[in-house]
Image (cartoon, rainbow, N blue to C red):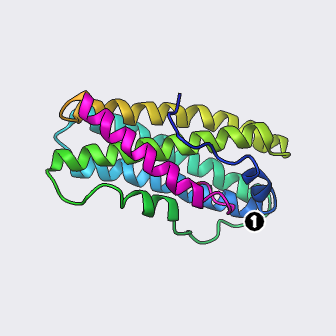
Amino acid sequence: MLGLKLPTDPRWVNIVEKNIHEILTDHAFCEQKAASTAISLIVRYPEESELVKSMTALAQEELSHFEMVHQLILQRGWVLGRERKDEYVRNLQMFFPKGGSRRDQLLLQLLYAALIEARSCERFRLLSESIADKALQKFYRKLMISEAHHYSLFLKLARQYGKNEKSVNEKWESLLNFEAKLMVQLGKKETMHG
């Protein structure tokens, strides 16, 4: 369903289990960045009413997810910790060339967001099925469903705002292929995407 070309190595869960605090901190900041991305799209494209409506709802949901992850951190007697650089997102955003029209930039932002949500969904599924901590299994199962919805939303919006569906699908496919090559190098850290 997600279209990912390379699944996460299931051994990634073993890495995560060695430092739950790290993955929760990274996850919290991923949720915060997702909310920021939605707000940024509203600010950059206020004339796109459907986009603004969708991103308003998404920003609220992502902030509620941030709050949920933060609450988990506090319940375990930890503090949030500092934001980590997201090597995955930084490398992903180098794929498409810079520039182009505002419409082109919107399309690329939507495709990047769709892919990030798809990979998060896939990782949440792994955690929901394999992590030993039963509370985290349940938590990630619930969030997996939300991430799948976000992935679908961004891809739908990309197809809506792209020049034509064929062109959008070609860009999406090339981004998926690039991401698969990127994932060969990642999956060795207790981060959501790395």
One can see residue 53 in this view: no
Q: Which residue is mark 1?
A: 78
Residue 183 position (above or below residue 1)? below
Image coordinates for residue 40, horizontal then vertical, percent? 31, 53
Tell whether 101 sits left or right of 4.
left
Crowding near pointer 1: few (<14 within 10 Å), some, many (20+)? Answer: few
Tell whether 12 sits left or right of 144.
right
Q: Nearer the viewer, residue 135 or 118?
A: 118
Is residue 110 found inside the magenta-colored segment of the image?
no
Image coordinates for residue 117, horizontal then vertical, percent? 50, 43
Question: Hey, which quadrant is residue 192 in on the image?
Answer: bottom right
Q: Nearer the viewer, residue 176 or 83?
A: 176
One can see residue 43 in this view: yes
Is residue 190 found inside the magenta-colored segment of the image?
yes
Question: Hey, which quadrant is residue 137 in on the image?
Answer: top right
Give the residues drawn in magenta, as a range: 166-192
Residue at x 75% of width, y 51% of height: 13
Q: Nearer the viewer, residue 60 or 157?
A: 157
